[in-house]
């Protein structure tokens, strides 16, 4: 089966580097399934789970907080501000982040705080979903 190399990279370093048979990402315009040999593209990502299908029928899941996917025929690179696999997600921390964000959304001071709280809530919910396998 054909495979493509996938790298998921954050400012803190690489989080994922493997050969996979398919990558499924959520771009701002919708879900995208990427197979080896895909035409070169760059697309912005939402706060979402990246699904990486391996040859052995297993699927790796990585939570990403937006960023970009760059597709080349033999390589997919995801550049994102932060990324975690389920085993490195601290569920209690994400739940605390949800609480904080919800409080901020209730006592909204201005539009900037509201937007920041909304994004924080999305990141935390995404981490919880990946940790609990709800994707
Ligand atoms: P928090 O409010 O808990 O810091 P955040 O969404 O503001 O969450 P980010 O700015 O997205 O955090 O990420 C900062 C760093 O912390 C990144 O390295 C990210 O991978 C890590 N991180 C954030 N939340 C978690 C979590 N629940 N479990 C593990 N790592 C996390």
Image (spheres, helix red, strand yellow):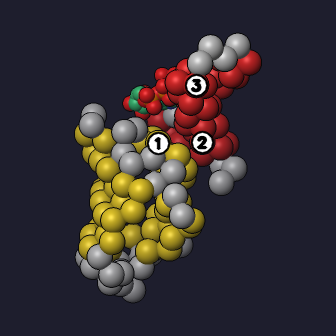
Residue 130 x/y as whole percent: 60, 45
Ligand 1 within 8 Å of disc 1? The answer is: yes
Horizontal arrangement in the rendering, residue 86 relative to residue 67 (left or right): right
Using a 10 Å C-alpha cutoff, classify the residue at mark 2 as few (fewer than 14 neighbours), some (14 to 19) or many (20 or more): many
Q: Earlier in the sequence, mark 1 or mark 3?
A: 1
Q: Secondary structure at mark 2?
A: helix
Pair 3/2: label in front = 3
Which label number is shown at residue 126? 2
Front one among 111 and 55: 111
Residue 53 x/y as whole percent: 49, 69
Image position of 46 with respect to 95: above or below: below
Q: Residue at x 54, y 64 (%)?
A: 29
Q: Residue at x 32, y 50 (%)?
A: 79
Which residue is under mark 3? Answer: 111
Q: CA distance from mark 3 to mark 2?
A: 22 Å
Residues under numbered marks 2 and 1 in contact, where contact means CB atoms less than 8 Å apart: yes
Which residue is under mark 1? Answer: 65
Using a 10 Å C-alpha cutoff, classify the residue at mark 1 as few (fewer than 14 neighbours), some (14 to 19) or many (20 or more): many
Q: Residue at x 47, y 42 (%)?
A: 65
Image position of 129 with respect to 55: above or below: above
Front one among 18 and 51: 51
Front one among 95 and 28: 28
Q: Earlier in the sequence, mark 2 or mark 1?
A: 1
Residue 110 x/y as whole percent: 59, 18
Q: Earlier in the sequence, mark 3 or mark 2?
A: 3
Image position of 14 with respect to 116: above or below: below
Front one among 118 and 11: 118
């Amino acid at each position: 089966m054909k495979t493509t190399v996938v790298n998921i990279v954050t400012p803190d370093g690489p989080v994922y580097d493997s050969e996979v048979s398919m990558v499924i990402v959520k771009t701002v315009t919708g879900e995208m399934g990427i197979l080896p040999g895909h035409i070169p593209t760059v697309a912005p990502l939402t706060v979402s789970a990246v699904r990486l299908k391996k040859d052995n029928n297993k699927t790796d899941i990585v939570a990403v907080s937006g960023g970009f996917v760059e597709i080349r025929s033999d390589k997919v690179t995801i550049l994102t501000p932060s990324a975690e696999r389920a085993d490195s997600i601290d569920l209690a921390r994400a739940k605390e982040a949800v609480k904080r964000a919800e409080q901020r959304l209730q006592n909204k001071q201005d539009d900037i705080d509201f937007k920041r709280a909304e994004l924080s809530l999305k990141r935390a919910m995404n981490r919880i979903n990946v940790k609990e396998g709800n994707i």
